[in-house]
Image (cartoon, rainbow, N blue to C red):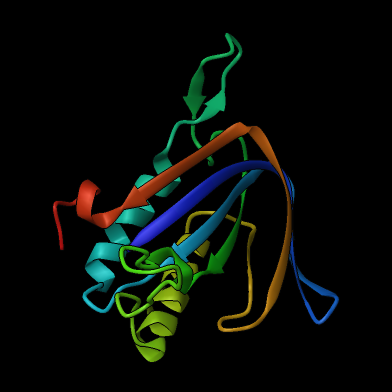
Amino acid sequence: MKFVIQRVTYAEVCVNQETIGKIGKGFLVFIGVSQDDTQELADKLIRKLINLRIFEDEQGKTNLSLQDVSGELLLISQFTLYADCKKGNRPSFTKAGDPVLANDLYEYIIAECRKQIPNVQTGSFGADMKISLLNDGPFTILLDSDEICGCS
């Protein structure tokens, strides 16, 4: 599982020219699911996501978490995080999870995040989405379960 986290001052997702999710200060998170991912693995990455201290405190140090700043979440499913570009110029996506598994885990992540963060917005699984954002910093972090958990 992979989370690409961008600290934003604003983010929005549109489908068919209609805004379906919009946040202010918080995290825009792109979520990639592989075939081997589980709810237990998702729980570990969710804990890390919620507790990341990458917002500035009064001294200008990145010392505050999403909850500390009343931050919001915009969660977007993105299978292309599992693109394999080793051969040729056309990426392979065989490492991405089956759409049914990926959607189930995406929905699970949304539900778990909503238990801790009051405003969680989402994209639309499998849709052609247009995403606008203002990256704050810029600050972008990759959480990869292979590195975080020692999982495969």
**Above or below 14: residue 26:** above
| Residue 114, placed above or below residue 17 | above
Q: Which residue lies furthest to the front in this view?
A: 88
Front one among 140 and 21:
140
Q: Which residue is at 23% across, 47% downward?
A: 148
Q: Farthest residue in the top direction?
A: 59
Report x, y in % for residue 117: 55, 54
Task: Classify residue 28 as left or right of residue 112.
Answer: right
In which quarter of the view is residue 135 placed? top right
Q: Which residue is drawn at 42% across and 71% down?
A: 91
| Spot occupied by residue 92 in the image (x, y as percentages of width and height) | 37, 76
Up the image or down, 50 lies above or below 123; here it is: above
Q: Which residue is drawn at 45% across and 31% down?
A: 53
> As rendered, which of 102 and 52 lies closer to the eye?
102
Q: Is residue 143 left or right of residue 26?
A: left
Vertical comparison of 26 with 29: above or below: above
Residue appearing at x 37%, y 67% in the figure: 82
- Residue 128 in picture, x, y percent from top left: 67, 79
> How many numbered callouts?
0
Q: Quadrant of the N terminus?
A: bottom left
Would you say 132 lies left or right of 119 here? right
Front-lying residue, 80 or 126: 80
Report x, y in % for residue 6. Answer: 56, 45
Which residue is farthest right? Answer: 17
Q: Locate residue 49 relative to residue 74 in the image: left or right.
A: left
